[in-house]
Image: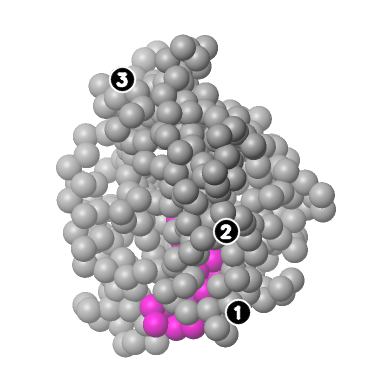
Amino acid sequence: MGVAGEVRVQWWPERGVGLRSSSGWAAVDPEADFTHAFDLRDQLRPATVYEMLVEGRAPGSQGVQCSLPVSFRTAPDIQQVLPATFTVVTGQDFTRRDDADGGHQIYVSMGELDPDFFVHTGDVVYHDKPGPLARSQALARYKWNRMYALPLQRAFHARVPAWFLRDDHDVLKNDCWPGQSYGELTWEQGLAVYREQVPTGPRPYRRVRWGRDLEVWFVEGREFRSPNNLTDGPDKTIWGGEQMAWFRRTFSASDATFRVLVSPTPILGPDRSSKRDNHANKAFQHEGNELRAFLAEQGSAFIVCGDRHWQYVSEDPDTGLREYSCGPTTDKHAGGFSAKNRSDVHRFLRVAGGFLSVSLEYRDDAPRLVMRHHDVAGRVVNEDVHEVR
C-alpha cells in the first residue's frame, strides 16, 4: 500500500523552532508496508509540548516532497505535580463508522477535551468482518490503511499521542489464540501487520508514569495466551508468566497515588455467560481469581477495559475493586448486552457507544482521580470521583 522512499522526522519544543532536532533520513521497508519507526525516547524532555514535522521523499531525491505537521506533549517527571487526562476507546469498525466521509465522530469529541494521551484497547480494525474479509496479509494492511486515511482519525492523532493495545479482531479473528490462522492470514502475519502499523517497542506490555500521582499499565492479552478450549487450571494463562511477573513486580512497587491497569479485555466483568475469552469468564477463572485478589490487596488500584460493546462500571462487593468498560466507538457498534442483564455488581450500565476519560485533578492541592463515561458526542453520562483514602 505504498512506494519506495525515505522519511525523516524533525521536532522542537513549542515556540522553540531554533532548537530543532532531526532523525536523519531513513528508507521505508517494503516488507513492512513501506513503514519506518523512529525511536525518540531518549531525545525528548519531560513535560514538554513538541512540534514535529514528518517528511518524505523519493529515492535519490534531495528535496522534501511531502510533509505532515503534528504535535504532542510528553509525560512529566516522577516528582512533578501536574493534572492529566487520557481517553480510552475500543471496537472501531470501518463499516460501522458514524460519519461516512470523516470516520468516527468520537475523535472530534475526544479532541475537545485536549487529552494528554489516548489509549486504544484493541479491535482497531476487524479482519473478520465484511467489507472485505481480511483473509490475507495484503487485505489486513488495506484495512489498516483505510482506517487511518479517515480525516477525523488523522486530525486527532496529529496532536494526541497514543498507546495501542491488541485484541482478537485486529490480530486475526474473533477469540483467537497463537497458532491459528484466518484464511491465508497466519498468526505471525497478523502480529507483524499490527507491529508495523503501530510500533510498540521491544515488548507489547508497557507502563507510563505521569508525575507524582499517576501510573498506568498497558497489558497484552493475545500473544502469550493459552488456547481458550484448554481445561482451566494453574497453567492456563492469558498474560503468560513473564508478563504476569512484570506486572506484579512493577505494580506493587509503584508509589504513585493512583494506579490504573488498562486491559484489552475484562478482568472483573460481569460478562455474558457464553463467553470464554477473558479473565471474567469461567474459562480463565483460575488466573482471573489470582489477578483480582492481587489487585484488591493494592489499594487505589483501578481497572479500565475494552472489548465489550457496552459501557459499565462494576464493583466487587467483597473488595471494592472497580472496573470501567469504555464502550465502543459508535452507537451502531453497541450491543451484546441489555438493561435486563444488569446485576448487583453494576454501578453503571449503558449499552451505547462512547468513551472513557480518566482525569487526574487537584483540589486544594489534594489529588483525585475522576472517571467519566461520555457518549459519542462527548456528553458525560456517568462520573466517579476517587480521592486519597
- Which quadrant of the figure has residue 246? bottom left
Q: Residues within 10 Å of mark 3 (few under 14, many from 20)?
A: some
Residue 1, percent from left and from top = 63, 60
| Tag 2: amino acid | Val
The residue range painted magenta reads: 164-181
Residue labelled with disc 2: 124
Q: Write down the residue under mark 1.
A: 135
Please report contact status of discs 1 and 3: CB closer than 8 Å, yes or no.
no
Task: Mark 2 or mark 1: name the one nearer the start of the chain.
Answer: 2
Quadrant of the image containing the C terminus: top left
Is residue 207 found left or right of 323 in the rendered image? left
Decide which of tag 3 and tag 2 comes sooner along the chain: 3
Residue 45 in percent (x, y) is at 34, 23
Q: Is residue 57 magenta?
A: no
Q: Is residue 134 above or below residue 184?
A: above
The local crowd at label 1, few if under 14, some if 14 to 19, many if 20 or more residues have their Cα within 10 Å, is some
Mark linked to residue 80: 3
The image shows residue 65 at horizontal and vertical percentages of 64, 37
Say if 76 sits above or below 61 in the image.
above
Magenta span: helix, strand or loop, mainly? loop
Q: Residue at x 25, y 60 (%)?
A: 243
Q: Dot 2: what SS? A: loop
Q: Amino acid at mark 1?
A: Arg
Q: Position of residue 233 (x, y in %)?
A: 25, 81
Residue 210 in which image quadrant: top left
Residue 202 visible in the picture: yes
